[in-house]
Image (spheres, rainbow, N blue to C red):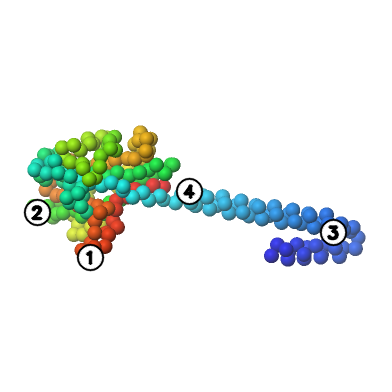
Amino acid sequence: MLKTIFKNELSKLTHVSDFSIDRKSLTNHYKSNNIMKLFTILSLFLVITSGVYANKPVKVKVVQDAFVQGGESADEAMGTTTEGRLRVMNSDASSKYARTAYLQFNLKKVEDFESVDLNICVRVFRSKKDDATQFALNIYACDDNKWSESSITFNDQPGAGELLASQTLNANDDNQWVSIALPKEKVMALKKASKKGKITLVLANNNFNRTSIEIISKERTWSNGMPAKRDAYLKLK
């Protein structure tokens, strides 16, 4: 198309009788102008598209997930014996119903972000005493990233650190996605404190009211053997 435009313009100018034409100079002039126009268009395209992709959310899936349970299971690695489920309830107790979940993410490839949301697919069980009872979920930071989902137990679980967020969840009859906003500065600080860019989040229930939750783990499969693909993930943008 540029070639056609160039020929048309050149033809117009070469028919002007009172104007002395140097065809070689004119050809070089038009080629130079067209190259500059093309360069400008490409530059604008790159600027626009780079802005679009810069704002595109980044999804980081959980790399390790497990829960721990007190009582007779205090030394049992629930991440291997109860695959597919992350249970949380009455986390401050020490009985067999004391359960806390751990999630680990690798943010090494994420340079910067303005917001971060934790997304989990969760079922909230109803209280036998009151169907309207809500579940109180707290999310804490954790400085220890050396735990393993195949060996973590109630008795050797890393301690929870600073509270990052709290969310009240209504009871439901099926697994539903829940998005919880986390403070970006604190998440960034956790990432920087880890040499490998890993961060650990602790999910706990510190206000027990006879309700509990069950989060779908990355190992979960449906009854037909197909992967559930409901892994917890962080959305950063």
Q: Is residue 164 above or below residue 23?
A: above
Residue under label 3: 23
- Tag 2: amino acid: Lys
Q: Name the foreground residue: 152 vs 95.
A: 152
Determine the secondary structure under disc 1: loop
- Tag 3: amino acid: Arg
In front: mark 2 or mark 3? Answer: 3
In front: mark 4 or mark 3? Answer: 3
- Tag 4: amino acid: Ala
Residue under label 4: 54
User: Where does residue 108 sit, x and y in percent of width and height?
Assistant: 39, 42
Spatial CA span between label 4 and label 2: 48 Å
In front: mark 3 or mark 1? Answer: 1
Q: Are marks 1 and 2 in contact (CB under 8 Å)?
A: no
Residue under label 1: 224
Please state if 61 lies on the left or on the right of 12 as rendered: left
Determine the secondary structure under disc 2: loop
**Residue 53 tag number:** none
- Tag 1: amino acid: Asn
Q: Are marks 3 and 1 in contact (CB under 8 Å)?
A: no
Residue under label 2: 128
User: Where does residue 63 sit, x and y in percent of width and height?
Assistant: 31, 47
In front: mark 4 or mark 1? Answer: 1
Q: Which quarter of the figure has residue 206? A: top left
